[in-house]
Image (cartoon, helix red, strand yellow):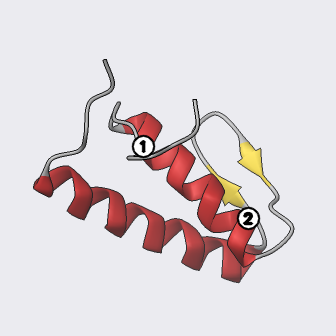
Amino acid sequence: MARKPTKKQRKEIKEGIKQMVREFEDTGMIQTSRAKYHPSNRRAAIKQALAIEYGWHRVHRANSPR
């Protein structure tokens, strides 16, 4: 069953997303240790950052489509 993030994890996820979006605005890409992503706009960058952060913390978003 999917696990919801704790309050501490939500804070860490929020900070990580902020950092990734700032990186996207500066360089035009989001880079992880394994891949480089080139979202087309800021909204797409936020979605990509969400996916990366939730994956790193091994939790799922509430109301996400299955």
Is the residue 43 above or below the residue 7 in the image?
below
Is the residue 1 above or below the residue 33 in the image?
above
In which quadrant will I find the N terminus? top left
Mark 2, other Cα within 10 Å: few <14 / some 14–19 / many ≥20: few
Mark 1, other Cα within 10 Å: few <14 / some 14–19 / many ≥20: some
Residue 43: quadrant of the picture: bottom right
Residue ID for mark 2: 44
Q: Which residue shows up at 74% across the image and 47% down it?
A: 36
Residue 2: quadrant of the picture: top left
Q: Which residue shows up at 34% across the image and 66% down it?
A: 14
Is the residue 40 above or below the residue 31 in the image?
below
Q: What residue type is labelled 2?
A: Ala
Residue ID for mark 1: 54
Q: Percent position (x, y) of residue 49?
A: 56, 57
Q: Percent position (x, y) of residue 56?
A: 40, 37
Which residue occupies the foreground of this view, 31 or 18? 18
Q: Residue furthest top?
A: 1
Is the residue 62 above or below the residue 23 in the image?
above
Q: Which residue shows up at 57% across the image and 29% down it?
A: 66
Q: Percent position (x, y) of residue 25?
A: 68, 81
Q: Percent position (x, y) of residue 10?
A: 24, 57
Q: Which residue shows up at 71% across the image and 77% down it?
A: 42
Q: What residue type is labelled 1?
A: Tyr
Along the polypeptide, which appears first: circle 2 or circle 1? 2
